[in-house]
Image (spheres, grey):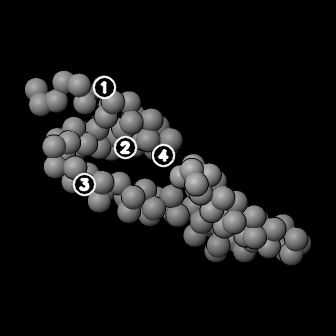
Amino acid sequence: MSPLLVIAGMALVTFVPRYLGMRLSGRPVPPFWMRFFQFVPIAVFPALIVPELVAVPDETGVRLGAFALAALALLRWRALWVGLLVGMVAYWLLRPWWPF
């Protein structure tokens, strides 16, 4: 089975019940939970990124460089998608020329 198909299937299986549960209940989400949900991407992002920084010893320098540029972009624009975009572009542009 294709890994992409597995990921899509798991996303569907986890998203649909949660979405339907919130939509079909007819009740508004309490303000506490709305504030809580705003911090989920901020908490998940480092949990996914930090272990990958040193996962491949030959690429640690490139990954740290891309991470630093992404962190600067996040500090400047305060948008997670900007940090992801800058980090990925920096990683792919730095790879061919690393080490300097």
Residue in the picture at 75% in, 64% down: 16
**Mark 3 sits on what residue?**
55
Front-most of residues 47 and 82: 47
User: Residue extending furthest front?
Assistant: 1
Q: Position of residue 40 (x, y in %)?
A: 52, 64
Label 2 or label 1, whichever comes before in sequence order: 2
Label 3 or label 2, whichever comes before in sequence order: 3
- Label 1: how many residues lie within 10 Å, few (<14), some (14-19) or many (20+)? few
Please identify, in this view, whether the residue under mark 4 or under mark 2 is nearer the observer. Answer: 4
Residue in the picture at 66% in, 67% down: 14
Label 4 or label 3, whichever comes before in sequence order: 3
Describe the element under mark 1 as helix, strand or loop.
helix
**Mark 4 sits on what residue?**
80
**Amino acid type of the residue that numbered disc 4 sits on in the rendered structure:** Leu
Does the CB distance between marks 3 and 2 fall below 8 Å? Answer: no
Describe the element under mark 3 as helix, strand or loop.
loop
**Amino acid type of the residue that numbered disc 2 sits on in the rendered structure:** Leu
**Amino acid type of the residue that numbered disc 1 sits on in the rendered structure:** Leu
Number of the label disc, if any, that sits on residue 93: 1
Number of the label disc, if any, that sits on residue 5: none
Q: CA distance from mark 1 to mark 4?
A: 20 Å
Front-most of residues 37 and 97: 97
**Mark 2 sits on what residue?**
75
Please identify, in this view, whether the residue under mark 2 or under mark 1 is nearer the observer. Answer: 1
In the image, residue 2 above or below residue 40? above
- Observer able to see residue 14: yes
Number of numbered discs on residues: 4
